[in-house]
Amino acid sequence: MLYLFLLPLLLLSCGVKTNPQPLALPVVEIKRIGNKAYVRSLQGEIQVEGFEKVGEWFVREQSSAFCFKVKRLAGRTEEFCVKKALETKPVVYVRESQDSVLVLAEGFPSYRIYPVLDSRLNPSEGVQFKEQYTIFRDYRERCYAITGEKDQRESQPYELCIAPKPPPPVEDVQRLGYQEVSGKLYIFWSYTPDELFSEFVVYKNGKLVETTQAYMYQDTAPKEKTTYTVKVRNKLGFESPGVSITYNP
C-alpha cells in the first residue's frame, strides 16, 4: 500500500510527466455574400486578421479571392480562404397584394432572403427558398436583401423594400372635460381600451406634456386661455386624431 502511494512521487521526481492537451483550433462558420466575407466563431473566442467585428460576425469587403488567418484565443491559428465574389444578382419579380408581396426569383438553384436594418443584413437571419417567397406586409416599411446561392457562395444582394399596409384606426377618447379645484385643473376623459392600447398622450397648446395610462391629467390652473388635446397611442406607435378642450380662466 505504501508502494502505491510513493510511486507517483517517484515518477514526478524522475521527470516523468503526462502529455499536455493540444491547443484547440478555431471552429468557424464562413459565408461569402456578394463582395463581403463573413466569419463567426462556433466555439470559443477568436480574432480574424483583416476583418472588422460587427455584432457576432467579422466582416471584410473584398470581391477577389483571398486567404486570411483566424486565431483562437488561448489556442492555435489556422488559415482559411474564400473564393471570389459572384458578380451577378438574381432576377427578381414581385406580385403585390394588399396584405402580402410574392417574390419570384430566377437565375440560381436556390436563394436566401435577409431582413435589412440600418443598411446591413445579418447573415444569421437568412431564410432559404426556391423560386418564390411570400412576404407579409407590416405597418412599417421593411427592406430585404435577396441573394442567389451557387458553389457555396451567395450572389450580390438584390435589395427590395416593401411599403407598409394601412395602419389600423385608433379610436379617440370620449367625454373629455375638465374641473378646476383650488388652483388645480383636472382634465379627465373616458375610454374603452382594446388589445392594442398602449397609453394616452396629452398635449398642452400643441406641446407634449404627459403620457399616461390613467384617465386624468392634473395641471396648475393656467392664467390664460389654454387648449388641451388628448390622443390615444397604440402598441404599434400610431396615435388617434385627438380630442381637444379649451380652458378659459
Image (spheres, helix red, strand yellow):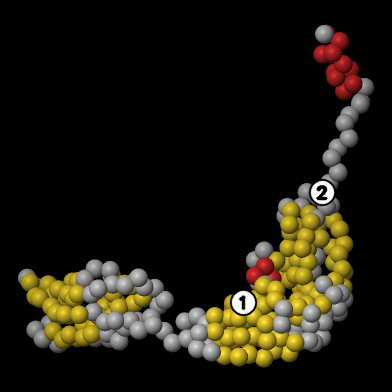
Label 2 belongs to which residue? 24
**Is there CB contact under 8 Å for labels 1 and 2?**
no
Report if residue 211 is visible in the image: no
Q: What's the residue at 78%, 74% (across, down)?
A: 32
Q: Is residue 152 above or below residue 56?
A: below
Q: Position of residue 151 (x, y in %)?
A: 85, 75
Q: Left of 92 or right of it: where is 207?
A: left
Q: Position of residue 213 (x, y in %)?
A: 28, 68
Cα distance, mark 1 to mark 2? Answer: 35 Å
Q: Is residue 15 above or below residue 52?
A: above
Q: Quick one: quadrant of the C terminus? A: bottom left
Q: Is residue 162 above or below residue 72?
A: below
Report if residue 246 is visible in the image: yes
Amino acid bearing label 2: Ala
Q: Position of residue 126 (x, y in %)?
A: 67, 72
Which residue is nearer to you in this view: 246 or 126? 126
Amino acid bearing label 1: Pro
Q: Quick one: quadrant of the N terminus? A: top right
Q: What's the residue at 57%, 90% (across, down)?
A: 96
In the image, which disc is placed on residue 25? Answer: none
Residue 211 image-quadrant placement? bottom left
Q: Residues within 10 Å of mark 1 (few under 14, many from 20)?
A: many
Instruction: Give the number of marks.
Output: 2
Q: What's the residue at 24%, 68% (across, down)?
A: 214
Label 1 belongs to which residue? 115
Which residue is nearer to you in this view: 70 or 159? 159
Q: Left of 95 or right of it: where is 11?
A: right
Q: Left of 7 or right of it: where is 43?
A: left
Which residue is nearer to you in this view: 150 or 189? 150
Q: Position of residue 84 (x, y in %)?
A: 86, 78
